[in-house]
Each structure stands twice: as structure tokens, then as C-alpha cells.
Amino acid sequence: MKGSVDPTGDIVERTFSSLTNLGEQTFTEPPYGSHYGMWMRSLQTVLDDFEASQVNSVDEPFREDADRIILEVSAALEESKAREESLKAAMLRAQSSRELLRRAEQRHSASLKDLRERHGSKLSTLAREVENAKAMLEETTQDKAGLLERLTNAKKLREKELRVKLSAAEQRYAEAEEALSGEEAALNGEDARQLDELRDKSDEGRSESASIEAELGRDGSIEARRNAAEKLSTAVHALLGRGQTSPA
């Protein structure tokens, strides 16, 4: 004679209550996949306790339904966990593009700084030469020529010599400045393409990160877990119905 299920027993009430709670359970923060194992163990414990209390009543159709539902939700949770891991990897890739840009910009700035420092010392020296030549010329121009200097044109010759010296100093300074500008332009040109590409990737990564972050903020297992709990409740109800209609 087949046993009957007591639909009013405490274990049955706890089974329905536990299944409802598990179906409605939400996890507060990611990674949501880290909670799935505990949720599955809780679900299995509810079923094990129920079957243990109804050892003479649980039939093959119930076991088949329960096993199928467990397999389905387990597969769904594995898929959700794998997707979460995939999104995390995509987030890291998106963030890495910004990090690559930051490092490239740092290298470029360091190269420019080194270039300017190397040229800066020479420019400072040349600038002093220009100022000294100007000062000497101004001093010579303002001095009053003596009788001998007027007779020999020595002052004029000195002024001419100093003007030539000043012009040469200014020319050397201009050439040094031009050399610095040329090397800066060459360096900027060499790095421009790489930096532009990295900026494009960084912009794409920033947009992608926002989308991924939104997806990572949602638990993709909610529907699968709720459906599993509801299907198991239906299976228990069906078993209860078969137990009540079984012949004595």
C-alpha cells in the first residue's frame, strides 16, 4: 500500500515557505556568482528535508521533476556566473586601454621634459652671450671717444666688431631655439599617431565600461532561481495531490 502525504505537516509548510524565500532571495552586491553555490545548497537541503520526512510517499515522478529542475537551475546559474566572469574580463580590458593611454602620455611628457632640459642649458648659455654682447655694445656706444680714437676711428671699429659679435650670438641663439622646436615637433609627430589611437580606444573603453558596469550591477540569475523555486513548489503540490488521492 502506498503511503499518503500529510499536507498540514510542519515540514510541508516549511518546505513551501523556504521555496518561496529562496525564489524571492536577492543578493546585495556583486560578484553575484559567489552566492550561487550557497543558494543551491540551501535549495537541496530544503528538498532533502522534505523527502526525508515523506520517505514513504515520494514517488518517481516527483524525483524526476525535482532532478530535472535542479539540473536546469544549476546550468542556468553556471551560465550566469560565466557571463559575469566574462563581463569582468571585458571591464579589465576596457580599463587597461585607459591605463595604456596614461602611461603613453607620461612617457611623452617625460621625453619632452628631457629634451627641453638638454637644450635648456645651451639656450641659457647662448642667452647670456647675447645679453653680454648687448651690454658691451651699449657701453662702448655711450663712451665718449678720445682724441686718438677720433683720429684712428678705433671707437667705430670697436662698435662694428661688437655689433658683429652680437649678431653672431643672436644667430646662434635663434639656431638653438629652432633646433629645439624641430626636435619637439619631431617627437610630437612620432607620438601623435599612437596617442590618438590610444585616446580613441580609451574613449571607447570609457563608454564600454559604463555599459559593462551597469550589466555587472544586475544579477542575471534572478528569473532562473525564481522559476526553479516555483516549479519545485508545483512539484510538491502535485505530489501532495497524488498522495491524497492514493487508495488506502
Image (tube, rainbow, N blue to C red):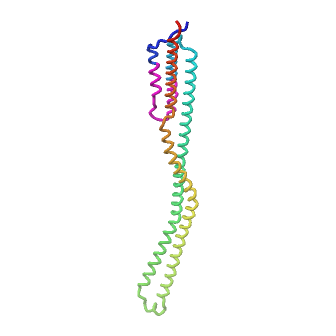
The residue depicted at 55 percent of the width and 69 percent of the height is 179
Name the outermost residue toward the bottom: 151
The residue depicted at 49 percent of the width and 82 percent of the height is 163
Q: Nearer the viewer, residue 113 or 204?
A: 204
Q: Is residue 142 shown above or below 81? A: below
Picture coordinates of residue 196, whole percent (x, y): 55, 56
Q: Is residue 196 shown above or below 149? A: above
The residue depicted at 55 percent of the width and 45 percent of the height is 93
Which quadrant of the view contains residue 144?
Answer: bottom left
Image quadrant where one finds the N terminus: top right
The residue depicted at 48 percent of the width and 88 percent of the height is 156
Query: Magenta segment: does it hold 34?
Result: yes
Which quadrant of the view contains residue 77?
Answer: top right
Q: Is residue 195 shown above or below 148? A: above
Picture coordinates of residue 197, whole percent (x, y): 56, 54
Which quadrant of the view contains residue 71?
Answer: top right
Picture coordinates of residue 100, whole percent (x, y): 54, 50
Q: Nearer the viewer, residue 130 or 139?
A: 130
Picture coordinates of residue 145, whole percent (x, y): 43, 89
Read off the magenta span. Answer: 15-41
Q: Is residue 33 shown above or below 122? A: above
**Which SS does the magenta portion mostly show?**
helix
Query: Magenta segment: does it hold 230?
Result: no
Q: How many marks?
A: 0
